[in-house]
Amino acid sequence: MTTSTSSSDIQPAGPGKKTAFTRFLDTVEWLGNLLPHPITLFAMFALGVVVLSGIASFFDLSVIDPRPEGAAGRSADGVIHVVNLLSGEGLRTIVTTLVTNFTGFAPLGTVLVALLGVGIAEHSGLLSAAVRGMVLKASKRTVTIIVVFAGIISNTASELGYVVLIPLAAMIFHSLGRHPLAGLAAAFAGVSGGYSANLLLGTVDPLLSGITESAAHMIDPNYVVGPEVNWYFMIVSTFLITALGSWVTMAIVEPKLGKYDNSEASVDLSQDKMTQLTAEEKRGLKFAGLAVLGVCGLLALTIVPEWGVLRNQETGAVAGSPFLKGIVALIVVFFAIPGFVYGKTVGTMKNDRDVIDAMSKSMGTMGMYIVLVFFAAQFVAFFKMTNLGTIFAVLGAEALQSIGLTGPILFLFFIMMCGVVNLSLGSASAQWAVTAPIFVPMLMLLGYAPEVIQAAYRIGDSVTNIITPMMSYFGLIVSFATRYKKDLGMGTLISTMIPYSIFFFIGWTALFFLWVFVAGMPVGPGAATYFNM
């Protein structure tokens, strides 16, 4: 039955109706908001890593390097030692790398470059008109499902979900009389919490499979792990995460947030209001749609044919191709051309000056994010320089290994461990590069195939993405959220996302056990469940 989108449907439960879980989330929010501003927090984290490296170095903290001999990055003596930044040499390293830590922080360039194209589409009015055309007549339930599902699918296009969909979802919810932070949370849950689910193979698949295959070679030098080995499980996971994310949004997050008050915003939200499309806007959308088809056709010519200019020129494959590596540049083209066509049609963009103004306005909104990135980049860089992240990950992995469990229940602890490690080592590839050489051989010796081990890892890596400030785009999400709640603290965002993390972990882990160990289904094409020596 269709549900109404009226804001009266999403009133808070009221003081007398709060559940224990709601009170728990309120406590998390209160504690989290005791934390200083995210920028100050990252500065403190960076300083703390420097001090901790000095203490750890004094006590000679070290672990055996789990990576095989000859592997890239393996230490010369096979032992990972703490690098002391609280020393003369450490100070020289900090001073000489401060700028490059900032400019080399991958999300910074990705976000700013992508926003050049998105800014044109936004300020021409294309995004607003397209959104209004899609959701004005949709029910509350349908809009929520679309937002979560779109977030999951956006991972195929790399950072598109973080840069475009999350702020767009907040605007959609606000325009429909719903709390904008609920829309932001729903999209964030799909994009980041459902990071490893998808209907299509993405850039993360060959990245993880390569690490898995390398680790598997420690037991079987001829074992092959292709990018598609988790595809079946990831397809099914897409629908599970869509359902769970939509339910959590409507049943938990929106009731807790209550009715939105525009006075909480830090900017003018008048442009977020959604009205019926005019005849001119419909005409603009028609021409913009044709432009999208044209751009897609041209991009397809660069990658679909075997002679495609953006294919991998050495192997002729899509994997490792300039198309995938340059996806951010293609995002700019994908949004800029239709955006200008729409603006030219409806009269919001008449010349190059209007295009430049649109891009400048988009850059102007990123001031706080750029400042935050400076300090976040130092923290991430220092954590990597000192080897503390790698050491903590190895120690955590060894602690789980020491439990000595041999049955399928071991995967429950493995998934939990991956989720916990992800709180401090946010990169999926970096975390797997450290833990795979330990757990893939160990679980293979216990009789489990690398494909299944990798699928379990991906669950743990995804479900805590949305509650860790160590995730590269967490600062960006905070900056989006402060648009609608000017005094928003990190605790507010984390407490809002905790329900997604909990239910994703429970549901996704249950699906894994049912799919693999109860139904005996393969996690991907040709993927084995058990490994025999």
Image (cartoon, rainbow, N blue to C red):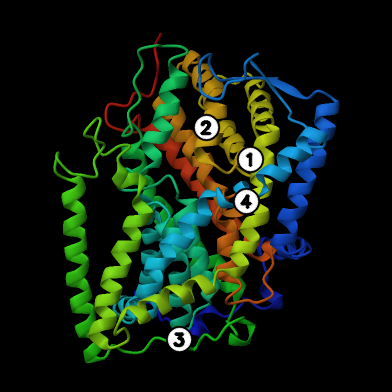
Q: Which of marks 4 and 2 is nearer the N terminus?
A: 2
Q: Which amino acid does label 1 sit on?
A: Val
Is residue 409 in sight in this rendering?
Answer: no
Marks 1 and 3, how far apart at CA = 40 Å
Q: Nearer the viewer, residue 47 or 11?
A: 47
Q: Quadrant of the C terminus?
A: top left
- Spatial CA span between label 4 and label 2: 17 Å
Alpha carbons under labels 2 and 3: distance apart: 43 Å
Are the residues at dot 4 and dot 2 in contact (C-beta closer than 8 Å)?
A: no
Residue 271's tag is 3
Residue 476: image quadrant is bottom right
Badge 3: few (under 14), some or many (20 or more) residues near its Cα, within 10 Å?
few
Numbered badge on residue 312? none
Q: Which amino acid does label 3 sit on?
A: Gln
The circle drawn on residue 468 is 4
Give the residue number, with chain letter if any, for mark 2.
432
Identify the residue at horizontal 45%, vertical 86% (top origin): 271
